[in-house]
């Protein structure tokens, strides 16, 4: 019992973490993952994504019992009825969640026990871009501000190093800052 | 009643849409929006974003009654307990939702009545990047595939034009393909 308990830090099984790292170093083909979402329009600004299956470590995942159903919407000022957070807000959530989990995992690997991780994200947008009324502003956020507050049983410098390492390794931070090639196909009828 | 009903297409009030466009053309400062998310670590890979307030059209929004609470997690193979979709999956959801709403709004503006909008998104990732075991693969998705199926009361070419215009104007598509500057601050203790 205590040997198992010793490997859990910040709610992360560091024994499993290091075993996974070793396995992937030995067999890099196991590092190939594919995540997926299917989305269906419901009406107006309301649509819903279903997220369940993914490919991981050489095969299709069988551990996820139920699909996640995630509703998107827009507030009234953007012609919706607030059926969910809007897509740009979900992007902020994706970024916050990925940085947070990265901080928690890096801290666990470095024997730092965290007490709290909180963040506030802001995204500034000039809606003239997305509305197409002016060619100058871009469609998306001009900038995103991320403000973290992290506490734990380590000196300030070590906590800052954990955040810096997490920022360097976060999948969504990489995508949001550097962009990703997107290939879009359309079928009609 | 019928005058009001005539302005609703695809669940979108096109009268309000065109009024909004005219207003923003006249007063570009009303186009400044800020969206926000706050996130709190719960344990392990489990964290939760709270999304409510935003700045829009010259003031702080007062129309949203309740906050959206959105849980993130990781599946077992990524050391979590499946407390929610994972951050990279939320990024796919954000992209799917934004493209879908853009399609619906563009169609409404162009007098196209849609019957269905469905999409499947895939994101391919080599986990060696995010795990830091190999400097070569990037952290995030190497590519994202988006496959739309759109049906409605318009010829195929017009439906394809709607999707192409939506792709050109989507806020999240812009951010995911082109990237966004992110400024990250950290406080400890």
Image: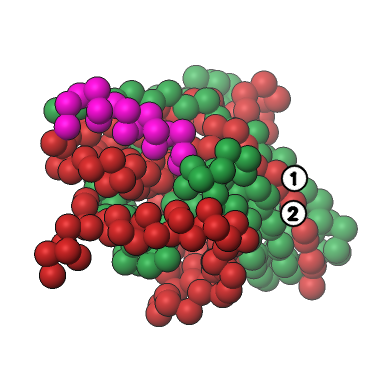
Chain colours: A red, B green
Neighbor class of circle 1 (other Cα within 10 Å; few <14, some 14-19, many 20+) is some
Which chain is disc 1 placed on? Answer: B
Q: Check residue A158 for magenta coloring.
A: yes
Please report the residue visible at 30 percent of the width from the left and 59 percent of the height from the top. A15
Q: What is the chief secondary structure element of the magenta stretch? A: helix
| Image position, residue A86 (x, y; %) | 46, 49
- Residue B59 lies left or right of residue B23; in this view the side is left
Disc 2 and disc 1: Cα gap in Å?
13 Å
* Magenta highlight on residue A164: yes
In the image, which is nearer the foreground, mark 2 or mark 1? 2
Is residue B83 visible from the viewing direction of this image? Answer: yes
* Residue at image location 59% in from the left, 52% down from the top: B126
Q: Give the magenta part as a residue range.
A: A154-172
Q: Please, is residue A2 above or below residue B133 in the view?
A: below
Residue B165: assigned label: 1
> Which of the labelled discs sits on residue A184, or is there none?
2
* Residue A106 occupies quadrant: top left
Are dots 2 and 1 in contact, CB under 8 Å?
A: no
């Amino acid at each position: 019992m205590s040997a198992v308990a010793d490997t859990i830090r910040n709610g992360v099984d560091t024994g499993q973490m290091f075993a996974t790292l070793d396995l992937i170093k030995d067999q890099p083909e196991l590092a190939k993952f594919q995540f997926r979402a299917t989305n269906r329009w419901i009406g107006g600004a309301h649509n819903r994504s279903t997220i369940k299956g993914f490919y991981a470590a050489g095969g299709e995942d069988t551990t996820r019992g139920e699909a996640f159903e995630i509703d998107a919407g827009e507030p009234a000022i953007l012609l919706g009825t607030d059926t969910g957070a809007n897509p740009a807000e979900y992007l902020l959530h994706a970024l916050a969640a990925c940085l947070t989990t990265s901080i928690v995992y890096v801290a666990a690997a470095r024997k730092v026990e965290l007490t709290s991780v909180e963040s506030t994200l802001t995204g500034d947008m000039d809606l003239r871009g997305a509305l197409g009324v002016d060619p100058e502003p871009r469609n998306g956020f001009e900038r995103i501000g991320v403000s973290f507050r992290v506490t734990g049983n380590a000196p300030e410098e070590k906590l800052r190093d954990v955040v810096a390492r997490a920022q360097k390794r976060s999948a969504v931070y990489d995508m949001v800052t550097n962009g990703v090639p997107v290939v879009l196909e359309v079928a009609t009828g």
